[in-house]
Image (spheres, helix red, strand yellow):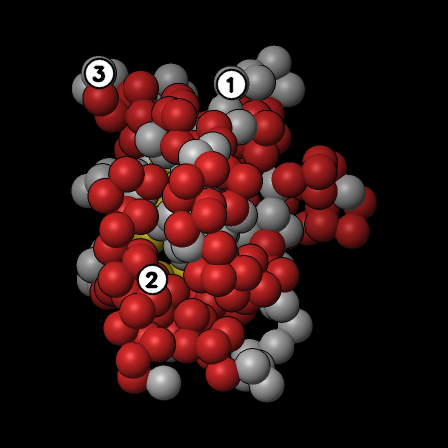
Amino acid sequence: MDGLKEQFERIFEQLEQQFYVKSWVSERSKLIFILESPHVQELKYGAPVSGSSGSTMSKHLFGSEFGKPLGRLIAKNTEEALHRPSLDVIGLMNVCGIPMQRKAYGQPEVIRKHGAFFDVLEAVRKSNQQDVYRNGSWNVMQEVILERFRARLNGIKGKTCTLVPCGRFAQKFYRLAGVSDPSWTVIHGVPHPSYNSWDRERYRGEIHKVQQAFISARNALGGLN
């Protein structure tokens, strides 16, 4: 499978040149959300959760009157050096830096060229209930994603912060990455913010923990803006 891994890594590198969405984590980030992967709006704005899921997050963190996607707010705050405490304390990171759904790429020639690659990538995305697959190519793809994600986690080791893996995919990959640090607090069981899942009664306790962690981090930084 070494040859297949090298092939997948080459395709990742090619796609990352045009379709990579970076993490938005700064020295002031104390509450870091870990999401699955970018989609159309994330590619457009260059930040995780720049679509409807990001709007859900903003409403639960800042109030129901704030509907602008969180990713766009974080990007604007950083790029314009606004230094608003309520945004400075938040960091955003994807497990996979490129879209895991082929339709997000919007370029038929790219989708045709890498059709077999996207078949495997999408299969791994959908199979959160398994750690090890019967299909060897799925295991190889999972390891390629994991290695990249592990590197991002290692990049924040030693940082005092709270990590929030959102959804089963992010939770699984955070667990499999095997990276931990005594400076980290992890809030488990938080759903992905898509499909209004943060409004569901069954997750009220987890979302409350996220909100309290946000308030504490913001207050420690010294402001409400």
| Chain-order first, disc 1 or disc 2 | 1
Q: Quadrant of the C terminus?
A: top left
**Residue drawn where x is 19% and y is 42% of the image:** 27
Question: Relative to 165, does residue 61 appear above or below in the rendering?
Answer: above
- Nearer to us: label 1 or label 2: 2
**Residue drawn where x is 38% and y is 65% of the image:** 145
Around disc 3, counting alpha carbons within 10 Å, would you say few (fewer than 14), some (14 to 19), or many (20 or more)?
few
Apparent side of residue 17 relative to residue 72 in the rendered image (left or right):
left
- Nearer to us: label 2 or label 3: 2
Location of residue 170 in the rendering, given as x and y in whole percent from the top left corner: 51, 59
Apparent side of residue 178 relative to residue 80 in the rendered image (left or right):
right
Residue nearer the viewer, 173 or 189: 173
Which secondary structure lies at badge 2? helix
- Check whether the beta carbons of the residues at disc 2 and disc 3 lie within 8 A of each other: no
Location of residue 177 in the rendering, given as x and y in whole percent from the top left corner: 38, 72
Which numbered tag is attached to residue 149? 2
Residue nearer the viewer, 94 or 121: 121
